[in-house]
Image: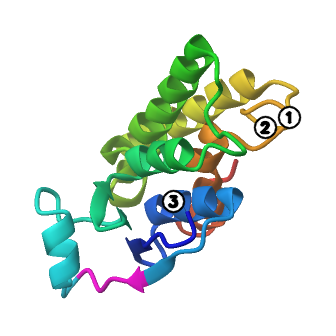
Amino acid sequence: MENEEVVLLDLWASPFGMRAKIALAEKGVNYEHKEEDLSNKSDLLLKTNPVHKQIPVLVHNGKPVCESLIAVQYIDEIWPHKPLLPLDPYQRATARFWADFVDNKIYSARNRKIWASKGEEHEAAKKELIDSLKLLEGELGIKAYFGGEHLGYVDVVLIPIYSWFYTYEKCGDFSF
């Protein structure tokens, strides 16, 4: 697969783009990174993601793959060495469940209320985020990674959020 064209349309600060970068790095895939200006979206971004017009977009041999969770799964399937998703169908479904949980409970619009709300609504949003993180921590247990002994799909989905903890503590008025 030496003559492959792999391009990632992304923004340096995007936690969603970071997921694709981590997956590509774990797989040892060389790719071209194209930084997007979201206030002036490139023709390539608009052409490759005409529905949502968002990053990240992974372009593999001219074919676009949109949405971070889908891109990470695609990367895992195309470059199957060092699998991120478990081989067992039930464990794979469970990993997908937890990745979806992260997107819906950690990155969701509901938790954006932490930044946009005050008073009781702010406190409720903080509690919801902390409760969600406690559920994840319980699922992780004493394992080194959600993937078991090595980095896995859920880990790739979660890693970018760790950088947010500092921001929550400094700007979001609470600590973990």
Can residue 20 be found in the magenta stretch? no
* Amino acid beneath label 2: Tyr
Residue at 35 percent of width and 50 percent of height: 113
Instruction: Work out whether mark 2 precedes mark 3 in sequence or the reverse, and give the earlier one.
Output: 3
- Please state which of the two labelled residues, at mark 2 or mark 3, is closer to the viewer: 3
- Circles 1 and 2, Cβ within 8 Å, touching? The answer is yes
* The quarter of the displayed image where residue 136 is located: top right
Image coordinates of residue 19 in percent, x first then y, are 53, 57
Q: Which mark is residue 149?
A: 1
Nearer the observer: mark 1 or 2; the answer is 1
Q: Gap in Å between the C-alphas at discs 1 and 3?
A: 21 Å
Q: What colour scheme has been applied to the protein in the rendered image? A: rainbow
The residue carrying mark 3 is 20
- Between the residue at mark 1 and the residue at mark 2, the CA separation in whole angstroms equals 6 Å
Amino acid type at circle 1 is Glu
Q: Residue at x 34, y 53 (%)?
A: 117
Image spot of residue 77 (x, y percent) = 51, 41
**Residue 33 screen position, x and y as percent:** 47, 81
Which structural element holds mark 1? loop
> At x 49% / y 49%, what residue is drawn?
72
The residue beneath circle 2 is 145
Alpha-carbon span between mark 2 and mark 3: 18 Å
| Residue at 57% from the left image edge and 22% from the top image edge | 92
Does the image show residue 143? Answer: yes
Quarter of the figure that contains the N terminus? bottom right
Residues in magenta? 34-38
What secondary structure is the magenta-colored segment mainly? loop
Q: Decide: few, some or many residues near mark 3? Use Cα within 10 Å; few <14, some 14-19, many ≥20.
A: many
